[in-house]
Amino acid sequence: MRGWGDEMSRRRSAAARRKAFEREEMLWKRDKLSFIAAVAAFIVSILHRVLFKPDVMTGERGLRAVFLFSLLRIILGLAAEASFGVALGRIMLIKRSEPLVTAADTMEKKYGSCKNKKKQNKAGRIAGFVLLYGFLFLMYMSFGVRETALYSQRNIKDFSRFDNLSYVSFMGSTFMDMTEGETVAVEVSGAHIGTDSISYAITSRRYNSRRHSSLTYRFSVLEDGGYENIVQVSKKEREKLEAALDSEKTYTVRLYKHSGLMASIEEKH
């Protein structure tokens, strides 16, 4: 009877180990999918930031374009953050199976000390997840501060220097402008289209030597005779405005109250 009982115990242990390994394999497959989704969301978010910019930034069409661009940017950013959160959570917070139980584990379970350890381990995993995710979140929020499609307008309106937060400001301000339609008239002498640019030094090592280069981003802006930025315009609008403006004349520029985008520009008579 004892031998038969030992055999049944071994079978139960083997079945438990098999189930544990199957569960572990399933969890790892889910983790892979979570990471793939996180990376995909991050790549799409970056591609949208780098490759796509509003074609129109003036008038009611410009308001809608900037609003939709900012809204999509926020949605993609939140999707990337949520995907990374899920991926990290699956790795750091989900309890893994223990297919092999040692004699020490058995003694701990018998005397109750294992429960305290589990509580401590869970608290440690939660703390680690919060700290790591918080760090990654701050990195992501500050990522892209060097270049944004609305860089010049962000500086003109003194919106947040953090790229992702500035899109929240643009979405809110353009929405209010679309709802209210209020504008402010500004007289501009010597109006012309200029280029607002930012450059960053890049240093690389190669063959025991350093190479220095720069990365430059350029934006089209309406400037006055003193080269002060009045409002940002899109690249497609640049050529049309360059052909229409005369730096010897004075223009009345109407800017939307909240976003500061251009509603219209007319020669002053």
Image: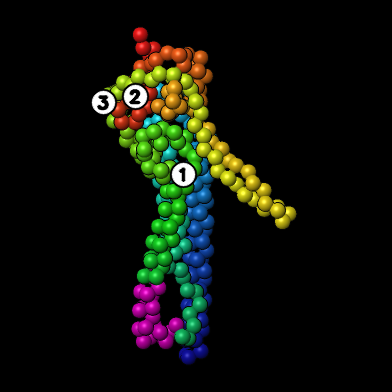
Amino acid beneath label 2: Leu
Q: Is residue 220 magenta?
A: no
Q: Position of residue 185 (x, y in %)?
A: 31, 21
Q: Residue at x 35, y 8 (%)?
A: 269
Answer with left or right where residue 174 lies relative to residue 32. Answer: left
Amino acid beneath label 3: Glu
Q: Give the residue at mark 1.
A: 145
| Residues marked 3 and 2 touching at CB (< 8 Å) | no
**Gap in angstroms between the C-alphas marked 3 and 2:** 13 Å
Q: Residue at x 67, y 48 (%)?
A: 211
Q: Is residue 123 above or below residue 56?
A: below
Q: Is residue 187 visible?
A: yes
* Region of the chain picked out in magenta, as a range: 105-122
Q: Give the residue at mark 3.
A: 180
Q: Residue at x 42, y 87 (%)?
A: 107
Q: Residue at x 36, y 39 (%)?
A: 159
Q: Position of residue 238 (x, y in %)?
A: 50, 22
Q: Position of residue 158 (x, y in %)?
A: 36, 38
Q: Give the residue at mark 2.
A: 255
